[in-house]
Amino acid sequence: MQYHTAQCNMAWRNCVQCWRQSTFRDNSSLGVRFLRECRFNFFTEQRCGFRKAPKRSEQRRVEAEEVGQKEVNPSESPANRKSLIPPVEPPPSNAPHRTFRVLIKPFVFTVGFTGCAFGTASIWQYETLKSRVQSYFDEARADWFEKLRPQKEGGFRKQVNRWWNSLSEGQRTVSGIIAANVLVFCLWRVPSLQRSMMKYFTSNPASKALCLPMIFSTFSHFSLTHMAANMYVLWSFSSSIVSLLGQEQFMAVYLSAGVISTFVSYLCKTATGRFGPSLGASGAIMTILAAVCTKMPEAKLAIIFLPMFTFSAGSAVKAIIALDSVGLFLGWRFFDHAAHLGGALFGIWYIHYGHELIWKRREPFVKIWHNMRTGGPRGGGGNGSL
């Protein structure tokens, strides 16, 4: 009986152990299967789910980019409209350092443009003198026919003609220059032209366009005050300079002065590394002012707002050169002192030496043009004199 009882106990123990082992195996297999399914679902949810929300710094960066894209063009802001210079985009940080090698092309353009300006002025004077004889007979014939036919009515047209005829030759000459400056000033107010105006109507040695802005920037003003001051000085000295040089020579000197003063500005900006856009007719006008003051140093001048204080023209040009020299060495950046100084020195040089070296030696060129116009022999058959 005891032996039977012991066998039954051993049998029950074996059954319990087998049941525990089978239960553990089933639970472990279920746990592994569950972990595998959970792992698969985890990766599936990461691949197919939504992206994580960006951090605060990333959100601020995205919002700043969106706001920057929606910002209005800086040239349209009221503060930039009232400034003396157009809005300037900051240069890229990886911009290459400019060397004097970039000034080779502007130097060649300056020499070539100056030669073309004086050559064109010589041909212009030749054609003007040649047409005066024919115009004399045409005017006499026109006066005869004017007496026969009835006069046209038009009070406004007569007043305009009377006003135009009352102007001096110098004032009529600079009227076209003033009109060109006003036109360019109006183009600055067109938003769609801002990029082109910055590229071609401002001079900067760090820009891709170097040659054309040297002449275009001479007719460019962004501020109304800047343009009014320059045009007033040009109008005031127009009669004196045209009576000294003549209409044709004046235009050659004025255009050449604009290019030469811009090249001097290029040279100083490259030497100092202070790049930036420049515009305005100040360099060319400084040439005209310096030329008149050098030719007539005893003439009395006065400031428009202080007419009671007068000073000599010679003292004025010395003071202007001294002021621009100080501004250039101290690095003042409100004006382009290098362009002012270059224009003034060119005007003084032209009165002392340039007129003899350039204008009085134009006769061979005029002879070539005369032979081309008249079809005369190249070796002889006409002296080409007027």
Image: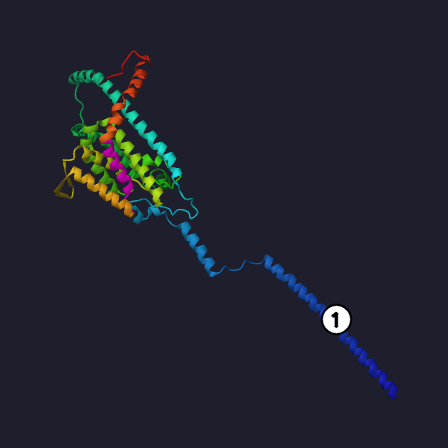
- Determine crowd level at label 1: few under 14, some 14-19, many 20+ residues with C-alpha closer than 10 A: few
| Residue depicted at x 41% and y 53% | 67
When the figure is inspected, residue 291 is found, relative to residue 382, above or below; the finding is below
**What colouring method underlies this structural image?**
rainbow
When the figure is inspected, residue 294 is found, relative to residue 97, above or below; the finding is above
Q: Which quarter of the rendering shows the C terminus?
A: top left
Residue 335 part of the magenta segment? yes
Residue 217 part of the magenta segment? no
Q: What kind of element bears circle 1?
A: helix
The residue most toward the bottom is: 1
Q: Residue 120 location in percent, x, y?
A: 30, 25
The residue most toward the left is: 308
Q: Going by the image, does 385 lie left or right of 191?
A: left
Three-letter code for the amino acid on which mark 1 is drawn: Arg
Q: Going by the image, does 348 lie left or right of 25?
A: left
Q: Residue 381 location in percent, x, y?
A: 29, 11
Q: Going by the image, does 91 lie left or right of 164?
A: right
| Residue depicted at x 30% and y 44% | 85
Q: Which residues are magenta?
A: 333-351
When the figure is inspected, residue 73 is found, relative to residue 15, above or below; the finding is above
Q: Residue 174 location in percent, x, y?
A: 23, 32
Instruction: Please indicate, yes or no, whether residue 276 appears anywhere in the rendered image.
Output: no
The residue most toward the top is: 381
Q: Residue 363 location in percent, x, y?
A: 27, 20
Q: What predominant SS class does the magenta segment belong to?
A: helix
Quarter-of-image position of residue 264: top left
Q: Which quarter of the rendering shows the N terminus?
A: bottom right
Quarter-of-image position of residue 323: top left
Q: Nearer the viewer, residue 79 or 290?
A: 290
- For disc 1, the marked residue is 25
